[in-house]
Image: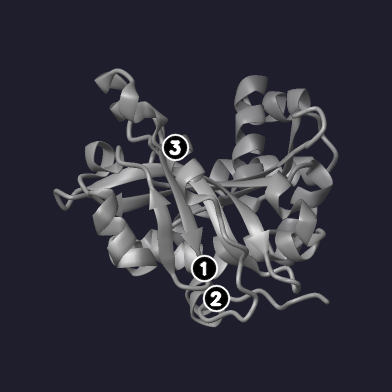
Amino acid sequence: MILKPSTWINYIDQAKGNASIPEKFMLQEVNKLINLHDTTSAILSHTVPITYLLDYTTGKYLMVSKNCKTVMGFTSADIICGGIAFFAERYHPENLRLFNEEVFVNMQKILNSIPKQEHKDHIFNFNYRIRNGKGEYVNLLQRSSFIKSDDKGSPLISLGVVTKVDHFVKNNPVIQVVERVDPINGTIETVIKNTYFLHEENKIFSKREREVLLYIAEGFTSKQIADKLFISEHTVINHKRSMHSKSNTQNAAALMSFAFKHNMF
């Protein structure tokens, strides 16, 4: 049965009170796992990701590692007591809209396309901004996996880690990467990579990109395009990469299809 994806906020409302109650989790063992750094050097409290266990059926965090106080300025008790609403209230409005309407919807589509027993083998990654304890927005990278789903394939329990990435990630664009971990040999393959721009103007191809696009449509190579525009081949390649990123396409054929659908010629 293929379920129609819903926004994140609607899903939270639907998931609460889900009749498919997860089996009892070994919370003490999970707690040991996510708080290993408590017994190590203090420097690790700044570098070890915040780890959490989230129950969608209640909208509550079952576990949150104690280093969140150092990284975010909130105690684990603050987050556990506040639940999903605690984070939702602190999301940057642009990131909340994007996650609610696009990132989470695409996440559900992938979950619906695979057997529920394989959900735990997929890692969902994306970056976003949230207001910390000082009221300042910080950039975070979240990696999570749905370790429990109901019979319909709807996610119930999520295990994830959150890392502060202010020095490495800009707030725009937002990158969503879904990876599959082979449970036998541990290898990782990228299932999909999406790029989302928070502002519509960032989605539009620049004048130079449109010029390159027209030459691609005519079948010219990067070297030929560079000669015609009196720029380097490396610059042409960068323009192509930018257009692929803005259009979430992987090759020239997909880029052409995107351009035609959006009346770019």
Mark 3 and mark 1 in contact (Cβ < 8 Å)? no
The amino acid type found where label 1 is placed reads: Tyr
Against 254, residue 162 (above or below) is above
Q: In which quarter of the image is residue 103?
A: bottom right
The answer to whether 14 appears left or right of 213 in the picture is left
Q: Are marks 2 and 3 in contact (CB under 8 Å)?
A: no
Question: Compared with residue 146, is residue 183 higher up or lower down, i.e. above or below?
Answer: above
Q: Sequence-wise, which precedes: disc 2 or disc 1? A: 2
- Residue type of the residue flagged with mark 3: Lys
What is the quadrant of the N terminus in the image? bottom right
Q: In this view, does 238 lie to the left or right of 181?
A: left
Q: Residue 46, percent across and down?
A: 29, 28
Q: Name the residue under label 1.
A: 56
Q: Is mark 2 on a helix, strand or loop?
A: helix
Q: Is mark 1 on a helix, strand or loop?
A: loop
Given residues 161 and 2, the one toward you in this image is 161
Residue 201 in view (yes/no): yes
Which residue occupies 33% across, 35% down? 166
User: Where residue 32 is drawn, which disc sits there?
Assistant: 3
> At 75% from the left edge and 74% from the top edge, which residue is drawn?
152
For the residue carrying disc 1, how many other residues have a C-alpha within 10 Å: few (<14), some (14-19), or many (20+)?
Answer: many
Q: Quadrant of residue 138?
A: top left
